[in-house]
Image: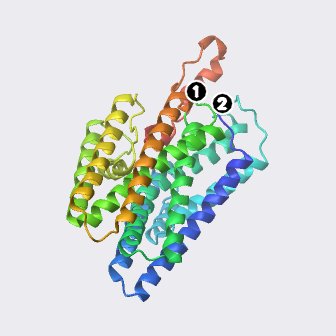
Amino acid sequence: MMKFTKPNFIFLVGGIIIYVVDIGVDFWVVSKYFCQRQYSWSILILCFRGFSSLITQIFSYEWFKNDWEGTDTGKLKWIFLVHLFQCGIFIRYWFALKYGCQAAFKQNSGGDASETDPSNFIQKQAIDVVTDINMLRVFKTFLETTPQLFVQIYILMEHGKNNFDQYAAIIMSFCGISFSTVDYQTSLRKSLPDKDEFHVLPKLVYLFYKLLTITSWILSFSLITLLSVRSSVTLLVFLWICGFIWTLKQHTAFCKSKKMEYLYRSVVGIILIFTFFNIKGRKTKVYISIYYATHTVVTLGILFAYIFWKPPIIKEIHFTIVSILTVLSLVLGIIFLVLYYRWFHPTAYCRPQACSDETDGETEQRERAKPGRFQNFIMQ
């Protein structure tokens, strides 16, 4: 089992700071729009925030119920009350800081010990609680941050105003996407057995792959929204339906209840609108090729549609710049994707261990070890 290190703790603190600042920036932008009497944008941003918070609180509370099954019901009532007021994530951050500090600064256990070894208990607790947070942040990223980024870029392209608050919101959105994607992949490596450490170079390649492909897709959607809002909404709904149906066909088993499983599949359908995820941990060469080939065709189709119709809402020079950025980010994103999956992706998942290298006690401990929730989560 990998260890929770001091750099991991620093990233955890940084994630908390960005989370709090992101909330402040959201309400600041909303207040600015209200003052400018742009009520529709304010309501839309608040809807993204509210919907994301509701979904993450539901999953967070369900995970607390699953993890604390058989414990005092009084604790669960307090946990429910905190989640009802949309503050459940802060409880998880408190546990993360508590166990993370102990694991990073006070534990010196060996890395080869079993997860059930008492000396590694704090390490496992720290990794598990941070993993849960990063899972929730992935939900938040694609339910709130990415749609907000799309809205902010659309407003910027439509009105052409250089407002500081808009740039601040865009920067915070990119920071949120960056931290959540990298932290998610780091947690994946730590939580699943026999994964290699996620070093700096793979992190950068993975980060650029995600950011560039998502940026290209958001710019494309901004263009089609300027062309026709109805067409944009129709395309989004169609892509969500395709993602949801594909998720159904994968027969995911992430949640204990059927209702939560369908909610999970619905959320994954939204995530698949913006980026690719392998929800079953299988080989993805065919799926990911189809996914990004479709993105490329749709992106080029949107650009050609703009060239054909030439809507007056956007200046030609602006369209040229956006088109170059869209194509360039898509090409570079796919290049980084190929680099990541060719040289940095952990292709060996749960490598078999030689039985002769384990004592009977170690074998029993491995069999009794409870599998982490992350093994049922979307695995890339």
Q: Residue at x 52, y 53 (%)?
A: 71
Q: Residue at x 72, y 44 (%)?
A: 5
Find numbered disc 1 in the image and state the secondary structure of the residue it sits on. Answer: helix
Q: Residue at x 65, y 22 (%)?
A: 361
Crowd class of label 2 (few under 14; some 14 to 19; many from 20; radius 10 Å): some
Q: Which mark is residue 89?
A: none
x and y, in percent, of residue 74 in the image? 51, 63
Q: Is residue 81 visible?
A: yes
Q: Which residue is mark 1?
A: 366
Crowd class of label 1 (few under 14; some 14 to 19; many from 20; radius 10 Å): some
Looking at the image, residue 327 lies above or below residue 154: above
Figure quadrant of the N terminus = top right
| Label whose residue precedes the other's in the sequence (2 or 1) | 2
Dots 2, 1 in contact, CB < 8 A: yes
Q: Which residue is mark 2?
A: 114
Image check: 77 left or right of 203?
A: left
Figure quadrant of the C terminus = top left
Specify the amino acid type for callout 2.
Ser
